[in-house]
Image (cartoon, rainbow, N blue to C red):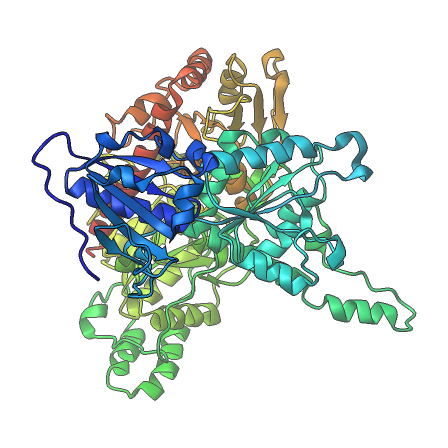
Amino acid sequence: MKQIRFDDPSSAQQRALLLGHFSTVGDIQCLEFVKRCLANARLRYDVAAFGANVRSELKGSISPAMAEPRSYTHLVIVCGPCWPGLLQNHNFDIDQYGHCKRIGINLTMVEPLAVWNPFDVLLERDSDAATRPDLTFLVGTEKVPVLGRCLIKSQHEYGARQRHSKVIDSINDLIERRGLPVFDVDTRWPKASNAGGIGSPEGVSALIGVVDTLITNRLHGLVFALRNGVPVIAVDSVAGGDKVTAQARTLEWPVCLQADEATPEAMDAALNWCLTSEAHAAVLHSRERAQRLLAGIELQISEMLAPANHPMPIGSDEIARPGPSGYFPFRSPPQQKPISAKPNFKSFAADDVKQSDWIEPDQLQVSRSVRAEPAANRSSLLRELVGLAGKQEPTEPPEDDENKHGTISPRQLSSEIQFDADGDCRYARNDRHFARVAHIFHQNWHGIRSAAGVQPGHKVAIPLQRPLSKGDLMKLVIQLEEWGIQKAVFHGFSDAAERAIRLVRAAGIECYLVWHGNLSQLAWKPEAQFFERAMTICRQGIVRRVHMMKSGMGMVFPRAYEPMLLNCPPSTNRRRLVPAFAGNRKIALVPAFPDIRKNLHSSLLGAALSSSIQEILHYGKILGTMPETARCKKVLYAGHHNHIAFLHDIDVSVNVTTIDCHPMVDMEALGAGAMVLSGPLFLDALTEHPFTALSVIANPFNVREIGKRLDYLSSMNNPELQAIMSDYASEITRVSKKRYAEFLNL
């Protein structure tokens, strides 16, 4: 194509008039292209459009009749059909611009050029002399999200509960404010009733499948979007929520707003999230969950319809059971386990078992034999090694406070060893550098289990309620070998953990021990006994490195690691719709159970003394009531995953403990975007961070200070508070991962 050039003006009086239809998006893009050429030539210009309706929308444009020909040195007619009648119909006399350089760009010349061609320079799109590609091919177009809108205007069966007009206004306001392209989708049938003339489910599915996000107040809008892999903003138009809310809850789809929640801020946040990769992962989860819950239902219906003497219920308990209201937990697709070849057992070299005081001579002989044997025979030798493991005398397990006080287990406990269970991997901060690391912990110790589950690496949850059998140990070592594990981190200590440590180390895998506790807990006899046994295996060299999660404990254990290993927030794969302390109703959760270390009553009373907290919820049982705590409400602890989801709806977790290491409940709240109040933790990192100053209550018994701190958080500039929380979460994650890597010599 011939290059478009304008004369380099030698005078400031040079000016061009750009004239055209400008009535299609193609015209507008061509106009933008020509304006860019004029700007490059440093030539000023005015824009004149033929149509009055176009001029009202085209900022700064004028009527051709208003243009003064003597003010211009160039006349440029841009895009579209051009013929003498066009100019006559708009009373535009081109001859008055005879002194100008007249240029035609991207025009369709209707008349033959020999008959009519008023231009000095013509770069036509098409004429009887030449044809060129349309100029829009030279204009880049930014890809913008496309929205679908699927609405129902009323549902008379809900009577006075209808809020459809309010919801539709909120949806249209979002679309108008964001300025994104949108088309309407109608799910009604038959074709005569459908506003788009679509007469089949396949047609509706095809239409929804091309949008980036669907916005709907219809149940089948929600369902068809998720079924077709499209994130959806669902708004329930029935006050109090009805079938749209119930369906979203069942599918664990997180973006379902009630009519009074559909504020501009919440709608913007919902749309922003729906345009992320997290939303697409959540769509896959909801779709897979629907298929899983409905698996076998066709057979169940067939059996119900068949002549039989016993009825069969349709669906499963999971479908029928109502979930908690107000939030919709979802999880990302389960992580695939690393694919490995058949088990490749390590050679049990002599240096791996040279500590003769912790391995028996017959075990030593077997372990030395393995390296000389072909792979086919190693499995039987490993079984022999496991069979030679001495059975330890059981010690009474340490006090399990959470079970003792009647809280519900956050995960389903199993009598079997669990490998990379979904509940232990769902919130992990994955990192490929930890691919050959396994974290081994007890199913019953929930805080430790959560802390280990967030760390990158494979996860092994061992039962505490029974001794590990030889079969268990065999299964454990084989699985570690299949994963290619080089380093095993044991979180906590017990009879089962000690047997596992000795066998895992004998299999040539480096063992590390993290003691999630402090010396005050040695007041319990079982804890003291386990502490002594942990010291023994450390002195024997079975454990390569050990850490106790309190500052200054490096001198207690041999080969201890300092500084402190810190916990970090979980990766929840979920975003809050309303930032903490940004809503009208402030909610505090006191997650502790009644124990002298957890200081439940101080946290409750402190929250109750706050004038800015409207709702105070707690899991633990209050043993002594006070007038101030009458407004505190006990809620059911419905399991770990529901707890994580619930944290996204509260503003602050009040967990002002007296003695603690680094509570995971604090990190879980932070990971869910909630603020945290804690007691003095004496961490050795980020002590000067603003989050530390805001969150730590120096005197955990000063209930007045707890209440005042909550009021202060409520009065803070919210964007500033969010920035502080976000930065601290990022920093504590960075420090945690860095220190674990140092601890493990990665």
Q: Residue at x 71, y 49 (%)?
A: 321
| Residue, far left | 10
Residue sitting nearer the eye, 521 or 638: 638
The image quadrant where one finds the N terminus is: bottom left
| Residue, far front | 115
Residue sitting nearer the eye, 698 or 59: 59
Expressed as whole percent of the image width and height from the top left, the position of residue 371 reads 24, 82
From the viewer's perspective, is 587 left or right of 34?
A: right
When asked about the image quadrant of residue 567, the answer is top left
Q: Residue at x 54, y 25 (%)?
A: 587
Question: How many numbered marks have been drawn onto this rendered protein structure?
Answer: 0
The image quadrant where one finds the C terminus is: bottom left
Expressed as whole percent of the image width and height from the top left, the position of residue 594 reads 54, 29
Q: Residue at x 64, y 40 (%)?
A: 324
Does 233 appear above or below 702?
A: below
Expressed as whole percent of the image width and height from the top left, the position of residue 675 reads 42, 28
Does 14 appear above or below 126?
A: above
When asked about the image quadrant of residue 502, the answer is bottom left
Residue sitting nearer the eye, 76 or 45: 76
From the viewer's perspective, is 160 left or right of 181?
A: right
| Residue 567 seen in render | no
| Residue 167 seen in render | yes
Does 214 appear above or below 434?
A: above
